[in-house]
Image (cartoon, rainbow, N blue to C red):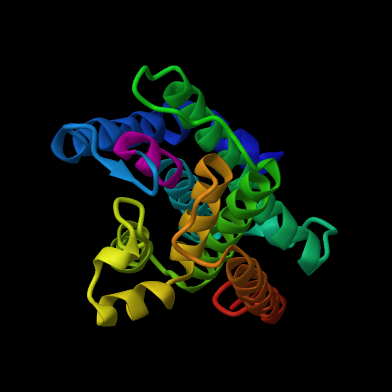
């Protein structure tokens, strides 16, 4: 509740602003690349990029929320609020991740509703299970990455560096705006090594029923990645590295 209340107090910045930014992406790329009835994977270009934009906004905001929690406490001197309550390490981690995922779901729902009302975009869900799995797994992955960043970072510049040099490139180069079949073989291999790509492809599959990646392979990969990231976060929190010292 603390984490949710924290970002909800500035909901104009944490929920509405990301939604507007995502819609601007849709407008710009549709105008620039979606003319003359361009079709991708059997659907209009706007309907092709819309699911990727939704889940990309979810992931980026999950990271933004989780990467601020402990870092803000360290810089503001309120880190004791996370250490003193009678909560286990697992409970603290669940709270940090749960708050970040709540923000991701709210942002994603806002963007989806706006796109649903958009006249030239179709965002009807064909596979609800894929929507839930890939949306939540993507948000969970970035929440864990945000917690790790929040533990490691000592100032906001450190967190911004991870955002600008890791999260943003992986998001934008994940196949949101293109299918990887159009890339050179070397770049296809790079894309397939990017876990963001499987989140985007799986989430898009839930809307249009088509994917340029193996949906089953994406399920197992994301489960493995999240288990690994979650384990690392748990061990870092338990050790107190850069938190208790």
Residue at 51% from the left image edge and 23% from the top image edge: 113
Q: Is residue 163 left or right of residue 207?
A: left
Residue at 30% from the left image edge and 51% from the top image edge: 177
Residue at 55% from the left image edge and 31% from the top image edge: 109
Relative to 132, say whether 175 is above or below.
Answer: below
Q: Is residue 140 left or right of residue 23?
A: right
Chain part drawn in magenta: 44-52
In the image, residue 153 lies at what x, y percent?
43, 69
- Quarter location, residue 73: bottom right
Q: Is residue 47 magenta?
A: yes
Q: Is residue 60 magenta?
A: no
Residue at 35% from the left image edge and 68% from the top image edge: 166
Query: Which image quadrant: the N terminus?
Result: top right
In the image, residue 72 lies at what x, y percent?
49, 54
* 14, 193: nearer the viewer: 193
Q: Is residue 65 left or right of residue 132?
A: left
Can residue 185 be seen in the rendering of this structure? yes
Relative to 77, say whether 17 is above or below.
Answer: above
* 211, 66: nearer the viewer: 211
């Amino acid at each position: 509740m603390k984490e949710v209340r924290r970002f909800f107090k500035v909901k104009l910045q944490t929920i509405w602003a990301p939604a507007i930014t995502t819609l601007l992406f849709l407008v710009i790329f549709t105008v620039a690349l979606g003319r003359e009835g361009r079709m991708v994977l059997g659907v209009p270009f706007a309907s092709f990029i819309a699911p990727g934009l939704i889940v990309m906004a979810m992931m980026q905001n999950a990271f933004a929320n989780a990467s601020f929690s402990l870092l803000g406490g360290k810089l503001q001197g309120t880190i004791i609020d996370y250490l003193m309550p009678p909560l286990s390490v697992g409970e603290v981690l669940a709270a940090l991740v749960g708050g970040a995922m709540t923000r991701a779901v709210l942002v994603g729902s806002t963007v989806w509703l706006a796109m649903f009302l958009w006249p030239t975009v179709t965002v009807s869900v064909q596979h609800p299970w894929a929507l839930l799995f890939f949306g939540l797994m993507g948000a969970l992955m970035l929440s864990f990455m945000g917690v790790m960043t929040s533990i490691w970072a000592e100032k906001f510049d450190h967190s911004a560096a991870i955002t600008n040099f890791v999260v943003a490139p992986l998001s934008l180069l994940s196949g949101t705006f293109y299918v990887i079949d159009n890339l050179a073989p070397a770049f296809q291999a790079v894309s397939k090594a990017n876990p963001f790509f499987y989140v985007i492809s799986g989430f898009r599959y839930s809307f249009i029923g088509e994917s340029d990646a193996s949906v089953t392979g994406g399920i197992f990969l994301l489960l493995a990645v999240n288990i690994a990231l979650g384990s690392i976060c748990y061990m870092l929190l338990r050790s107190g590295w850069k938190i208790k010292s």
